[in-house]
Image: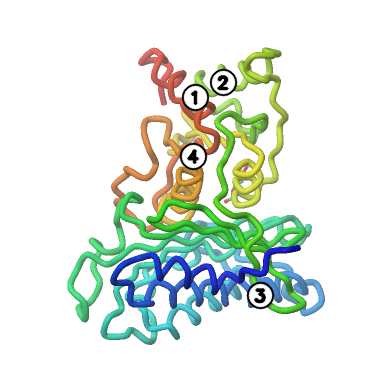
């Protein structure tokens, strides 16, 4: 018998287990799930309603904006604004923070999101996703939110998750309670039904996810790790399989369920950059999900969640997935000579 627990029911059950809960956090999660259903509908028929392709605009990341990026961004901003629970929003698509049109007197939540991660894959019908993080403001209610509210370390998140639009649409989220749960959308009834209860990710994976096209830019530790998982070692369960979709949400979701490690290292040669992925609305929320499922998320130097952000669109190196794999690459990075390090 399939699960008949809807996401709303699950959210309510979690609310009831939190003493003093007012229902505001639940209301916010309902709105995110609603946005996911609306985006699902358009993603699934994009080719039929002229929503594929680019808008012709370039976003703050310097990337050409896909029509569905814009659409997903608008849906999320509007649903979060309607709820009146959010005091400020950070979006991958917008250079500056967004102040919701409706801010209730008790609006205490700060939400960051990537409305449609992996959007370069949209026209090829490859899985894409929405990633979100929720924190509480640190400045007083009814005042204009400041950088202190927007730039909080991941350890201060109270909720995080993603919605992956793939062969089915699945919403996965976690809260400070610590469990990770997944809900599969049944379009015939328009409900997210609990399909993955208390997700735990394997201690060690069998999957390596990285863009080997960038290998020339990586520090030696990354190459050593890759060689170590390519070498047959029955005890370690190697060689691993290489799986790389080029859509972060889809790669991380698969590795969360099956076990594995996703690597996006810094480029230490050529144009030095500290990784491509964004801290506040990609690495942090996925790190909270993966760590609450028993995995790890590292910058290579330490926990992603411990990083103190200094800018809304700040990037970070990202090594995320099965605990033993992440610990292994951290050790290899630590053991590098000073000359070898990025
Ligand atoms: P590369 C998509 O553009 C994205 O931001 C992530 O979803 C994905 O993991 C990464 O970039 C892919 O980057 O350099 O391998 O194409």
Earlier sequence position, callout 2 versus callout 4: 2
Which residue is denoted by mark 3 in the rendering? Answer: 191
Which residue is denoted by mark 1 in the rendering? Answer: 329
Earlier sequence position, callout 3 versus callout 4: 3
148 over 142 or under it: above or below: above
Earlier sequence position, callout 1 versus callout 2: 2
Q: Secondary structure at mark 1?
A: helix
Identify the residue at horizontal 64%, vertical 73% (top origin): 39
219 over 153 or under it: above or below: above
Q: CA distance from mark 3 to mark 4?
A: 28 Å
Earlier sequence position, callout 3 versus callout 1: 3
Which residue is denoted by mark 4 in the rendering? Answer: 294
Identify the residue at horizontal 48%, vertical 52% (top origin): 179
Q: Nearer the viewer, residue 18 or 289?
A: 18
Q: Nearer the viewer, residue 213 or 46?
A: 46
Q: Secondary structure at mark 3?
A: strand
Q: CA distance from mark 2 to mark 3?
A: 42 Å
Q: Is residue 284 visible?
A: yes
Which dot, 2 or 4, sits closer to the camera? 4
Q: Tell me residue 127's x, y (percent).
A: 71, 56
């Amino acid at each position: 018998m399939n699960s008949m627990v809807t996401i709303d029911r699950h959210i309510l059950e979690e609310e009831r287990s939190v003493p003093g809960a007012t229902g505001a956090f639940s209301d916010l999660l309902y709105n995110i799930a609603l946005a996911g259903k609306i985006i699902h509908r358009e993603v699934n028929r994009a080719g039929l309603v002229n929503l594929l392709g680019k808008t012709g605009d370039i976003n703050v990341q310097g990337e050409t904006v896909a029509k569905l990026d814009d659409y997903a961004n608008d849906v999320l901003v509007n649903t979060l604004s309607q709820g009146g629970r959010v005091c400020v929003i950070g979006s991958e698509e917008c250079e500056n923070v967004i102040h919701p049109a409706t801010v209730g007197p008790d609006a205490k939540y700060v939400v960051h999101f990537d409305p449609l991660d992996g959007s370069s894959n949209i026209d090829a019908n490859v899985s894409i996703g929405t990633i979100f993080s929720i924190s509480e403001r640190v400045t007083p209610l009814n005042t204009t939110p400041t950088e202190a509210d927007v730039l909080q370390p991941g350890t201060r998140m109270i909720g995080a998750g993603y919605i992956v639009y793939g062969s089915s649409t699945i919403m996965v989220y976690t809260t400070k309670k610590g469990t990770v749960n997944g809900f599969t959308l049944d379009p015939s009834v328009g409900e997210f039904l609990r399909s993955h209860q208390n997700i735990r990710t394997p201690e060690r994976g069998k999957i390596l996810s990285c863009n080997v096209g960038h290998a020339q830019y990586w520090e030696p530790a990354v190459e050593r790790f890759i060689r170590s998982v390519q070498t047959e070692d029955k005890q370690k369960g190697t060689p691993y399989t290489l799986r790389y979709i080029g859509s972060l949400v889809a790669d991380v979701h698969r590795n969360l369920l099956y076990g594995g490690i996703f690597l996006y290292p810094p480029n230490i040669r050529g144009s030095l950059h500290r990784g491509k992925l964004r801290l506040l609305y990609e690495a942090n929320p996925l790190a909270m999900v993966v760590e609450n499922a028993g995995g790890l998320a590292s910058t290579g130097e330490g926990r992603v969640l411990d990083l103190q952000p200094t800018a809304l669109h700040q990037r970070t190196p990202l090594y995320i997935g099965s605990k033993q794999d992440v610990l292994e690459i951290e050790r290899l990075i630590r053991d590098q000579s000073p000359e070898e390090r990025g």
